[in-house]
Image: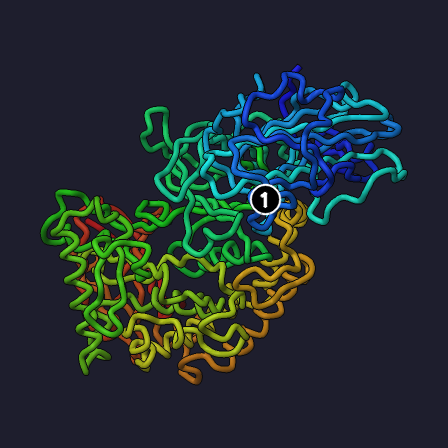
Amino acid sequence: MNLKPLFFLCITFVWGGKTGISQIIDHWETVVFAEDIWHYQPGTTEPPADWMQSNFDDSNWAIGPGGFGYGDGDDMTIIAPTLSLYIRIDFELFDTSKIEKALLHADYDDAFVAYFNGVEFARGNFGAPGTPPAFDEIPPTDHEAALYQGGVPEVYSLNSAQFKALAKEGGNTLAIQIHNFLITSSDLTSNFFFSLGIKDSSSDYAPTPDWFYEPFASSNLPIIKINTNEQTIEDEPKIVADMEVIDNGPGNRNYLTDPPNDYNGRIAIEIRGASSQSFPKKNYSFETQDELGENNNYPLLGLPEENDWILHGPYSDKSLIRNALSFDISRKMMDYASRTRFCELLINDDYRGVYLLMERIKRDTSRVDIARLRPEDIEGDELSGGYIFQLDRDDESTEEDGWYSPFGSNPFYAFHHPEYDDLLEIQKDYLISWMNEFEAAMNASNYAQTYEQYIDVPSFVDYFLINELTKHVDAFKLSFYMYKRKDSNGGKLHMGPVWDFNLGFSNFTFECPPEPEGWIYPCTSRAFWLDKLLEVPDVRQAVYCRWLELREDILHTDNLLNTIDNMVDTLAEAQVRNFARWNIMGVEIWPNYFVGSSYEEETDFLKDWLIDRIDWMDENMLGIGSVCLSHTEAILNNPSSLEISPNPFNQQTSFYLKSDHLLSGKVTIYNIQGKILDQFVIAPNQALQWNNVSLNSGVYFYQLEIPGRITERGKLIRQ
């Protein structure tokens, strides 16, 4: 009889009528360790058919401590290169009535099949259970071991019924065949541990390893299961896989055995990231697809429907929340930042820990809401906008994916959306030419009089403040996203969306001081114009006034700490499983500045650092001392600061901002349902002609912000 490995989590509570089995299991002990003495035989020929049985005579096999391999750092017994290896160990069980369940933790390279008393009960990287693989059979893909990288083995279980059917009081046998992907491979790993769930307080075996963890079975978070169908997820290209998502809604528990009720279909997935690819816990980018491989826009976990997604796996960030926290703050401050949902991930039934589902940055009405740049948009206003690009390193892209600035330190700008291959040459040339024109203006002596022609200052201010609040060490140099609207929609350069705060909040030890004091931009910025902008008195005033506005609400210390506490509470249960799977708590993981011995210490450090950071920024903010109007003062002092003429209007009207405070204003136009139709920045004491022939006749509304404060609202009537 072949038994398929199942996964269970031992839980001490009852949720939704389902009872956890740790009401039965008192504790866990280990009866077989990788480093125990095993009998082993390299697979040069097919072994006897009964080699995995308890009564098989293995006296002529070699013996030695496991694991077995080529001496690459995780082996106790060195063997010659081989395509397969057969290992056996006998062990004694005492009162089996005390044992409720057994677990096999497997750290292997590249595939294995395991037998308990002659019956297969687990296999890794060899497909579904069935006929034992031949001695020279090659697994479908390679598979890397985890222990030597700081990870933990995969886990396979024998539940109560399976264990009781196979176990014997007295002598028992664990037999395993290990297969290499290539005989020329530089490594082979065979580290296996067999542990028992004991129902009472007796202790007949050994304590479990430090990294020991139980299989995953249920969560208060949504569960995402990915099946690669025996393929390995690579950096690129994407592979086709199947994904199931279980989400029973707020307050309801999600069980691994529940049917998928959110998404159940095809995806294309690849590993993403740069330095994070060195971590055993990977980050992934994926697309939801239909059965024909076309885009399948879907509202994953309640987020607006789309087809491009990110699964971010926090690793060096042991608070697990730096990205989620930063995006949450940014969404409250700016037009858009990626929406997120915490979840727990399994790939091919292997539990991977806590992940953050994120929206990938792209043009969409629910993401970066700019005009779509089409192949036919090759002149005039249609050519002038719809671009998302980023300042980034050029070692992740070829030079053809972007361009080097001819100014400053020649930073590299990369096309993002539309991607390089989807842009026409005339569209690429337009954006490069426009950015060169902008940078030339910023390089000129009179840049302080011309910068507002090119930059949306409110977006720049917000982008600056969120990156400085987090003291993000990659700020203003990597994944520094920008987008350009069409000339008919202001035509200016907007900063954002923000991205990747994994190395924020003092989670770094390179390039810049991680302490709460000091600005981050002087040691990170690659764009010469950013430093120059921050020298302009009006910009510094806007930064200071916006900071005061945000500190009253969104960036109020209590609000920030409450947000952190809510996220920590949400992860209270799942973080335990995450750090059982990735045994790194208390371990320095590059580029950790602080290393806590517990999750509580990690999150307390984050909160304490943030409090100190806010205090420092309060006392040292750029433009400090500038005159800033409160909301009430602005309305009283500027009762009619925006003139609109004509109003009602036909196809166009003129906005004129009267201001004695040298502050630009942000005008937002929205319909009666509150949907934003247009936004633009208007310079003080200057008229701006505005037209929108696509508006139907009717009543619309406008509001004016100076800076970041709503000082005026009114009606706009289209005849």
Dot 1 corresponds to which residue?
353
Residue at 45% across / 79% down in the picture?
Answer: 621
Residue 630, image x, y percentages: 44, 74
Q: Furthest residue to the top?
A: 1
Q: Furthest residue to the front?
A: 60
- Residue 714 shows up from this direction: no
Residue 431, image x, y percentages: 18, 58
Q: Furthest residue to the bottom?
A: 625
Residue 611, image x, y percentages: 59, 71
Against 372, residue 45 (above or below) is above
Residue at 69% across / 32% down in the picture?
Answer: 39
Against 577, residue 464 (above or below) is below
- The front one of 296 and 332 is 296
- Residue 401 shows up from this direction: yes
22 sits left or right of 463 in the view: right
239 sits left or right of 132 in the view: left
* Quadrant of residue 499 within the rendered picture: bottom left
Against 452, residue 691 (above or below) is above
- The front one of 281 and 707 is 281
Colouring scheme applied when the structure was drawn: rainbow
Which amino acid, mark 1?
Gly
Disc 1, SS: strand
Residue 92, image x, y percentages: 83, 30
Residue at 55% across / 67% down in the picture?
Answer: 556
- The front one of 99 and 520 is 99
494 sits left or right of 595 in the view: left
The quadrant of the picture occupied by the N terminus is top right
Residue at 78% across / 36% down in the picture?
Answer: 31
Number of numbered discs on residues: 1
* Quadrant of residue 170 within the rendered picture: top right
Answer few, some or many: residues within 10 Å of disc 1's Cα (few below 14, many 20 plus, some between 14 and 19): many
